[in-house]
Amino acid sequence: MYVREIPQRNLITRRAAALLFGSCVLAPSRILASTPDRLTDDIVARSQLSTGDLGRLARVFAKARRGEPVTLGVIGGSITVGAIASSPANSYSGLLLAWWRKRFPECEINLINAGVGGTGSMYGALRAGRDLLSGTPDLVVIEFAVNDNWTDGEAYEGLVRQVLSQPNQPAAILLFMMWERGGNDQEMQAKVGTHYHLPMVSFRDAMWPEMAAGRMKWSDYIVDTVHPNDAGHAAVARFLIAMCDTGMNAVTKTFTADRPLPSPLHSDAFQRVGWRDAIDLVPVENEGWRQTVDDDKRPIWLGTQRNERISFDWWGTGLVVVLARAPDDHNRLRVCIDGATFQTLDASIQPRRGIIILARDIPPGRHTVEFVLLDDGSKPGTAEDGVRLLGLGTIGQGAADSDFRGKREM
C-alpha cells in the first residue's frame, strides 16, 4: 500500500494552472486533436448513471455566476492523482478545472487534488479532513471504485457523510472507473449514492459495452489493467462535465440547506474520525521500536525484534491501523486494547490489506493500544524487516476530537 505518493493537498492556483494548461481550455473531447471523437451521445448518456438531487450542484453554479471563488476537490486513488496522464493538464481533474475556468472566466476557480495512489475509501475517510475538507471545497468528486471491495461500504459511506455534512454543504459527484473485464465496486458504492440522492457518473457503464462488443479497444483508453491514458482521462472529464452541464442548467428547489442527512445505510463510524501519521504518534510506552522512514521516505514506526512493544493512547469507539504492507506469517503482530489481547495480525487469519480495523463498538473514551512483535528479523529471502506502522485512525463517537498523547522519547 502506498499512502503518500503525492503531497497530501495539491491546491492549484490560477497562476500555476496557466503554466500547466497554457491555452488548453477546449472541451475534453477536443483536447487530443489527433484522436477522433468516438464518444457518441449514447455513450455519454450511458455515463450519467443518476442525476440524483442536483440542488447542491446548482448552488455551486449560482455561486460561480455571482463571481465568487469556487474550489473543486477530487479524492481517490492513482487515477485521481493523474497516473499515466501525460501532464496534470491532461488528467481528468485538470480537464475538469479547465472547463470550469473557461465557463466562468471572471471567477477564481481552484482545485484541491487529494488523490493518493494505491488507497481506498477507508484511508480516504481517515485523511479527508486534513487533505481535502480543510480547503472548504464547493464540489467534490469521489473516485474509489477500483480500489475498494464490497466490505468497504461503511468507510465509503463515512467519507460521503463527511463531505455532505460540511458547514458549506458542498456538492458531491460519485465517479466509478473500472478495471479489466469491466469490473469495479460500483454496485456497493452506487447503493450509497442512491441513499444520499447523489449525482453518479460511470466510466464503466459508458465504455465497457463498447469494448466488450469490439467497437472500441481497451488500449485506446486504458494503458494497463486500470489506468487511463490521455484519451481515457479526457473521456472521464467529458462524462463529469456532462453531469456539471446538467447541474448548471437545473432549476431545482429540491435541496434544502438545513435538511439533515438521512440515517446511515451502513454506519456513521467513519463520519467521525481522527488521524495521526507515524511522525505525529507519541508513544505512552516504547520498548525497542524506532521512528524512521521507509524506502519511499514515509515516516514510520519500525519494530524488528520479538517482544518489542509500543503503545499509544487514543479516544473513540474504534481504531484503525495503517501499515506499510499487509501482515504476513513471519511478521506477526499482537494487538492489545486496554491491556486485553484483541487479535493477532498475520496472514493466516487476516486479509492481506495494509489497513485494518482493530477495534470497534467499544465504550467511548480514552483507550490504550499496544503492539507486540511475535517474530524476529527479516522475512526469509527478502531485505524487508519487521512491522512498519504508518499511522493510526480513530472512528466512532468521540473520534473527531481524538488525540494520540504520550511522552515523547528523548
Image: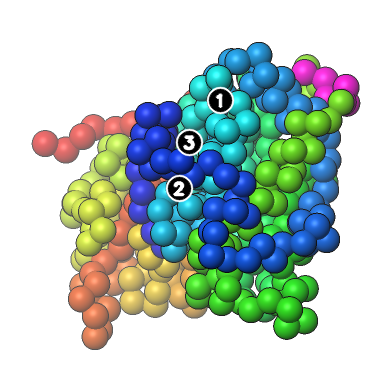
Q: Secondary structure at mark 3?
A: strand
Q: Give amino acid for label 2.
A: Ala
Mark 1 or 2 closer to N-term?
2
Residue range of the region highlighted in magenta in the rendering:
252-257
Q: Given contact means CB atoms under 8 Å apart, are the residues at marks 3 and 1 in contact?
A: no
- Quarter-wise, where is residue 211 in the image? bottom right
Q: Is residue 157 visible?
A: no
Left or right placement of residue 313 versus residue 259 in this view:
left
Looking at the rendered structure, the secondary structure element under dot 2 is helix
Q: Position of residue 72 (x, y in %)?
A: 56, 33
Q: Which residue is mark 2?
A: 89
Q: Tell me how the rendering is colored.
A: rainbow
Q: Residue placed at 41% from the left, 36% from the top?
A: 17
Q: Against 160, is 152 above or below?
A: below
The residue identified by callout 1 is 105
Side of 46 relative to 306 (left or right) = right
- Residue at position x 36%, y 34% from top? 16
Q: Nearer the viewer, mark 1 or mark 2?
A: 1
Question: Percent x, y for residue 299?
Answer: 26, 49
The residue beneath circle 3 is 112
Residue 105 in which image quadrant: top right
